[in-house]
Image (tube, rainbow, N blue to C red):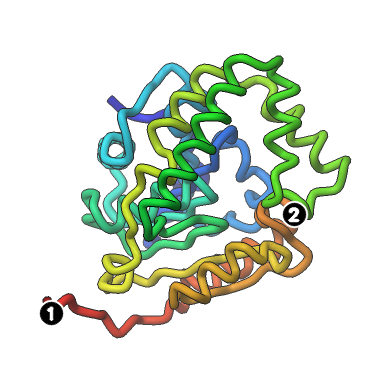
Amino acid sequence: MTLACTRLNADVKGRPWLVFLHGLLGSADDWQPLFAELSGWPCLLVDLPGHGRSASLTAAGFADVSQLLTDTLHGQGITRYWLIGYSLGGRISLYHACQGDARGLQGVLVEGAHPGLTCQTARAQRRHHDQQWATRFVQLPWKQALTGWYRQPVFDSLTDAQRQKLILLRDANSPHAVAAMLAATSLAVQPDLRLKLHQLSLPLAWLCGSADTKFITLAQQSGFELRTVANAGHNAHRDNPAEFARQALAFITSPVLKDVEHDLS
């Protein structure tokens, strides 16, 4: 089984593919603002389970999504690639790099993504939080649920016009499909990947909007390479797509090689 996806610039030779994974409630189309800046790179825009043209697909957890991604890459004939993931898509990218079939993976760039919770109390709180949202998605009128979602603190940098635009964009989603994906890939069930991420030999960086203070702080405290996009919040690739693309390509073409940490325990 494979995920629905869109190929761009497939005729470009000699460069690895850029594989884009969207966030919860999104789709492959979310990356459209970047297209003009990526004409020299082959790109694969993936619809995750429960979203876009993969809305009918379900996943049991991170391992399942990672395997679907591997099968999709194989089906597309992609053997060298970078992962670029936003929010949920970023967390899936991190998991895939650490615990999936990462053959051919050249590096990872994530936007607004969490490497994993470090204590059981935080996991229990997040499990409750995500269960509440999954229930709201299927029980509330859909636009009311979306309005509440985009009023969470992480989206504080949105203007009213930006918030309304996102609500309209997400209106076509299936509430039950999104709720199922939220439950399957909740941060509460994601492993803490920090140690494994620091042990990767692959280039890895966080690319955050300058106003996304939560994830800027998280990346800094976790010791990961950080790049910022000016005049942007949690959804930096939409807020300032030209600068996001410039920063992403600068990282991909001149990655910082890491001193790999080894677990000697």
**Is the residue 148 above or below the residue 139 in the image?**
below
Q: Position of residue 150 (x, y in %)?
A: 72, 39
Crowdedness of circle 2 by 10 Å Cα count: few (<14), some, many (20+)? Answer: many
Q: Mark 1 near mark 2, Cβ–Cβ under 8 Å? A: no
Q: Amino acid at mark 2?
A: Asp
Q: Position of residue 118 (x, y in %)?
A: 38, 60
Tell me the tag on residue 156. none
- Circle 1 sits on which residue? 264
Tell me if residue 37 can be seen: yes
Label 1 to label 2, Cα distance in Å?
A: 43 Å
**Is the residue 192 above or below the residue 35 in the image?**
below
SS under mark 1: loop
Name the residue located 49 percent from the left edge and 59 percent from the top edge. 110
Looking at the image, tell me whether mark 1 or mark 2 is earlier in sequence order: 2
Tell me if residue 36 can be seen: no
Query: Which of these two is toward me, 120 or 184?
Result: 120
**Is the residue 59 above or below the residue 236 in the image?**
above
Rendered-image quadrant of the C terminus? bottom left
Judged left or right of residue 145, residue 77 is left
Name the residue located 71 percent from the left edge and 68 percent from the top edge. 210
- Circle 2 sits on which residue? 239
Give the farthest residue toward the left.
Answer: 265
Q: Amino acid at mark 1?
A: Leu
Name the residue located 27 percent from the left edge and 70 percent from the top edge. 200
Q: Position of residue 46 (x, y in %)?
A: 46, 38
Name the residue located 34 percent from the left edge and 28 percent from the top edge. 59
Crowdedness of circle 1 by 10 Å Cα count: few (<14), some, many (20+)? Answer: few
Judged left or right of residue 93, residue 77 is left
Front disc: 1 or 2: 1
Query: Which of these two is toward me, 60 or 8?
Result: 60
SS under mark 2: helix
